[in-house]
Amino acid sequence: MTNIKIVTDSSCIIDSKRLKEIDIHTISLSIMIDGVIYANQNELDKEEFMTMMENSASLPKTSQPPIGEFIELYDELGKDGSEIISIHLTEKLSGTVNTARQAAQMTKSKVTVVDSDYIDQALGFQVYEAAQLAKKGATTDEILEHIESVKNKTQLYIGVATLENLVKGGRIGKLVGAVSGFLNMKVLCQLNNGELEVVSKGRGNKTFTKWVKTLEEKLTTYSVNSLGFSEADGRDIAEELKSSLSKVLPTIDIPIIHTTPLVATHAGKGAFAVMFYTN
């Protein structure tokens, strides 16, 4: 039986309880703020980074891992004959997955690269499921088929308190950003096929609390496997929305996790995301 090892990148978030159950390998994207490059995001305290970003003269810049780091990791993991499945954040937000594909052609190991079409905990859903199956001895084809199913049954919504970072980073239409900034609007987006689509917008947090009622109705029609919140100094609203969702999902553990500096850079201060996948 061939051993299979799972690789992902530092945009992936998995709840600590689940993380203890699996064995994965993570390659880090780097981030530059105020001229200082942090090659590993773990060097930065997540809360401290938010203050650094707020006080920075310009938007922090994120960079994908060098191809050499991928090749080195793949070579090391595959030297015992193991196969590798490398699952990464959507190529619509980063070139990381394409660098992984190039490295897969250059390594001595057998590597299959997957574009998750997601980021954060939604990427983590696929990574977790892949690692669980690998631990149970599933084949590469079986794992790939299953995580494709997880991808198709995943939804990610992001509430943005200020569109400044998304506009600066070119992640959303400038017209929407200008109007929302002028009217002090909040915007709720869905990450769909790797791209952000505006679902609703309005003034104040009632934009989000009103929308979550729609989500509650939707969730009652699903068998939810896992659901989680991520936030970038948006914990208060995440807590409020979690309280609402817990009423319709009383048996589901719903973590709230401070997101990575990479995600916070694009989402901006005060943002939150809710993501889930169904059976």
Image: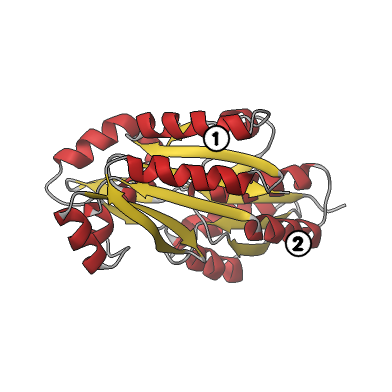
Q: In the rendered image, is residue 254 in sight?
A: no
Residue 123: % across, % down:
55, 51
Foreground pick, 179 / 37: 179
Residue projecting furthest to the right: 1
Q: Which mark is residue 35?
A: none
Q: Residues within 10 Å of mark 1 (few under 14, many from 20)?
A: many
Foreground pick, 71 / 256: 256
Residue 28: % across, % down:
45, 48
Select label 1 or label 2 by which is in front: 1
Residue 55: % across, % down:
14, 39
Foreground pick, 2 / 123: 123
Residue projecting furthest to the left: 57
- Taking the spot 64% from the left edge, 40% from the top edge, the residue there is 226
- Taking the spot 24% from the left edge, 48% from the top edge, the residue there is 162
Tag 2: residue type?
A: Glu
Task: Say above or below: 100 vs 78.
Answer: below
| Drawn side of residue 26 relative to residue 135, left or right | left
Task: Say above or below: 10 vs 143.
Answer: above
Q: In the rendered image, is residue 247 in sight?
A: yes
Q: Which mark is residue 145?
A: 2
For disc 1, the marked residue is 245
| Drawn side of residue 125 relative to residue 134, left or right | left
Q: CA distance from mark 1 to mark 2?
A: 30 Å
- Taking the spot 35% from the left edge, 33% from the top edge, the residue there is 46
